[in-house]
Amino acid sequence: MSDGPWQGRVDALDGEAGRRWHQVVVPWRPGRPGGVVMLGLASDEGVRRNQGRVGAAQGPQALRRAMANLPWHPPLALQDAGDIGCDDGRLEAAQQAYAQRAAALLADGQLVLGLGGGHEIAWASYSGLTAPGSAAAEGKLAIVNFDAHFDLRVAPEATSGTPFRQALDEAAQRGRTVAYRCYGISATANTRALYDTAHTRGVDWAEDHQLNLLTLDAHLNELRDWLDGYDHVYLSLCLDVLPAAVAPGVSAPAARGLAMELLEPLVCSVAGCGRLRLADIAELCPPLDPDGRTARTAARLAWQIVSAWQAATTAATA
Ligand SMILES: N=CN[C@@H](CCC(=O)O)C(=O)O
Ligand SMILES: [Mn+2]
Ligand SMILES: [Mn+2]
């Protein structure tokens, strides 16, 4: 795709081996063989409703621009299904439209890579994933959220702080097994009420200070064993899980955060478990992102996610 955000460097002398994502990504068309399809939710209405700093509606396009120059490694197939917008404050309608499109992509046999947008994308992702006939309509679903926040708020309407509360409520209503765990929770960014909800709902979590290079292996082993108990996995990555210096371009930057050397292996472990159905990257806020620093970090993590997913998929079909 040579227009819009998918533009970048061309290393013509290197031929196929010099290709980058902007040279291989194509618009989504149903029926192409399974690969990764990107779908944006260009919304910060959830952030606005959650008293945050807006700007994340520009996140999907900024993330595409940052991903354009990523090196392409075959056989990864990349498609772009565009954005669902939310210009009129009607967040619930945008989430529903996103869910419908995500469900269509999943039914087409694709891995969906969701591009936020505020973390209200998570309710839309969950709704698409669990829609009747969709990838995780039946079976046991694990949600792994990398985030400084639980996002389990009670609120009269959907916000960027409510998506996993909405998902757990919906799962309870339908009597289905949906487990939720978080890595990177900050004790200084979640109230007692949120911890109480996490306890009551049986949420697992690891706080930012509990993850370090001495404990990482134990966390990775436990995570692999835990994921084995589930049929489907949904990975959500809230960029405010990273230290503010690495990810300043978010509504609520982290005072401590998880360093990349901790986050990457955990993210890759989830993405490479062999049952990842959907991943999303939330909260990129370009107006708050000097030098596109957060976008660059987000692009690297997107690359890690799809590479780990591709390796697991290739191994399973070999
Ligand atoms: N999606 C982000 N949610 C956080 C925001 C916290 C803040 O703005 O300080 C939350 O609701 O807890
Ligand atoms: Mn967060
Ligand atoms: Mn979040």
Image: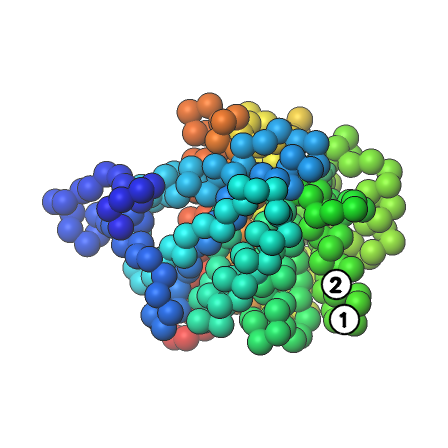
The mark tally for this picture is: 2
Q: Residue at x 48, y 31 (%)?
A: 286
Q: Residue at x 54, y 36 (%)?
A: 56
Q: Amino acid at mark 2?
A: Glu
Q: Residue 314: x and y, percent?
A: 40, 68
Please say whether residue 301 is visible from this viewpoint. no
The residue that label 1 is drawn on is 174
Label pair 2/1, CB-CB below 8 angstroms: yes
Q: Nearer the viewer, residue 77 or 228?
A: 77
Task: Characterize the local packing of mark 2: few (<14), some (14-19) or many (20 or more) Cα atoms within 10 angstroms.
Answer: some
- Distance from the alpha carbon under mark 2 to that under mark 1: 6 Å
Asked which quadrant contains residue 270, the reply is bottom right
Q: Residue 11: x and y, percent?
A: 18, 42
Q: Amino acid at mark 1?
A: Arg
Q: Nearer the viewer, residue 265 or 247?
A: 247
Q: Which label number is shown at residue 170?
A: 2
Left/right placement of residue 14 relative to residue 245 reads left
Q: Nearer the viewer, residue 127 or 142?
A: 127
Asked which quadrant contains residue 166, the reply is bottom right
Q: Residue 101: x and y, percent?
A: 50, 62
Left/right placement of residue 268 relative to residue 241 reads left
Q: Nearer the viewer, residue 152 or 4?
A: 4
